[in-house]
Image (cartoon, rainbow, N blue to C red):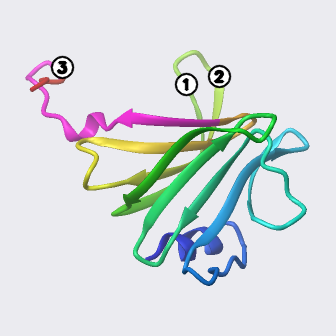
Amino acid sequence: MTISKFLNDKFNLDVICDEEGVYSYIIHTIDDKVKLDKVSSNITFSKSVLLECDDDNFISLKYFDDEEYQIFSLDGTKISEMEYLDDEYEDVNGDVNIEKSLIFYSKTWDRRYLRIDLQEKLSISFEVDYDKYDTDEDGVIVWE
């Protein structure tokens, strides 16, 4: 499945590609909620992430500060798998946690994944996929 089909289906969007075959999405905060939208002429990029993808599942992420200055970019990464976490659970302290996150995996990232949290505050992280590591008999990760 392509990233654009996945995002369009999951978030009920109708983003179509431009003349270069690129689909453009914006991740921004509206009314204290993080939202994934299609890019349009009336949307500002202030404190937002521009996510672009194509039918070959290459992505580009660009983060803009409050003055719409690009401060971070991740370009040209082919995504092999993706998922959307939508989960609510109670942790060991009895606190309720809500997860709403886009997860992207790439074969070029060895035992890592890109996570975009869509909760109350936008958060992007490049995380270690601990499930991909071997453990010893005590369950401790064996670092190579």
Say what amino acid the circle numbered 3 marks: Val
**SS state under label 1:** loop
Callout 2: helix, strand or loop?
A: loop
- In this view, the residue farthest toward the top is 93
Where residue 41 sits, quadrant-wise, is bottom right
The front one of 84 and 93 is 84
Q: What is the distance, in whole Å, between disc 3 and disc 2 at their CAs?
A: 26 Å
**Magenta-drawn segment:** 123-139
Tell me if I can see residue 138 in this picture. Answer: yes
Which mark identifies residue 95? 2
- The CA span between labels 1 and 3 is 21 Å
Q: Disc 1 residue type?
A: Asp
Residue 133: image quadrant is top left
Within the image, what quadrant is residue 18 found in? Answer: bottom right
> Which mark sits nearer the N-terminus, 1 or 3?
1
Q: In the rendering, which numbered label is found on residue 91?
A: 1
The one of 80 and 47 positioned closer to us in this rendering: 47
- The alpha-carbon separation of the residues under discs 1 and 2 comes to 6 Å
Check contact, mark 1 vs mark 2: CB within 8 A: yes
Q: Could you tell me which residue is drawn at 65 percent across and 54 percent down?
A: 50
